[in-house]
Amino acid sequence: MNTVKLSTKGQIVIPKEIRKAVHLVAGMELTVVLMGDEIRIRPASALPRTSVDEAAGCLHRPRRKLVDEEEVRQAIGEMLKAQDDVTRK
C-alpha cells in the first residue's frame, strides 16, 4: 500500500508504479467520486454517455466508403503505438 500527502492546494501525486500500471499520462482527465468513506479516482471516459436512442442508426450513412479489415488493423495499430510512445516518455 502506498501513502501520499495532500498538498496545501489539495493535490496528491499518484505513485509512478500505479500510473504505469493503469496507463495514466500527464494531462489525462480523471473522475473523483466519494463512495461512503472512500475516495475513488479513475480515468474519465473519452466519450460522453449516450442512450441507445441517441446511437441508433449512427453507423448507417448512404454512400459511406467501406473500410476493409486491413485498414482497421492499421488504424488500431497506429493508435496503440502512439499511446505506447506516450507512456514510455
Image (cartoon, rainbow, N blue to C red):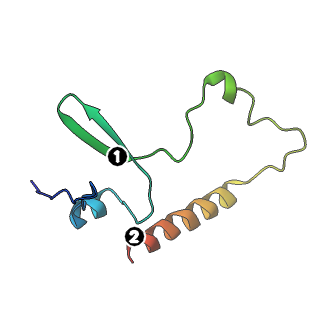
In the rendered image, which quarter contains the C terminus? bottom left
Q: Residue at x 75, y 53 (%)?
A: 67
Q: Which percent across, then down, holds residue 22? A: 32, 56
Q: Residue furthest top?
A: 53
Residue at 9% from the left image edge and 53% from the top image edge:
1
> In front here: 7 or 21?
7
Residue sticking out furthest to the bottom: 89
- In the image, 16 versus 34, the foreground residue is 34
Closest to the observer, 77 or 33: 33
Do tag 1 and tag 2 residues touch (Cβ < 8 Å)?
A: no
The amino acid beneath tag 2 is Thr
Q: Residue sitting at 55 percent across and 33 percent down? A: 49
Q: Nearer the viewer, mark 1 or mark 2?
A: 1
Helix, strand or loop status at disc 1: strand
Residue found 29% across the figure and 64% down from its top? 20
Give me the C-alpha separation between circle 1 and circle 2. Answer: 17 Å
Q: Which mark is residue 42?
A: 1
* x then y, percent, for residue 36: 20, 28
Q: Mark 2 highlights which residue?
A: 87
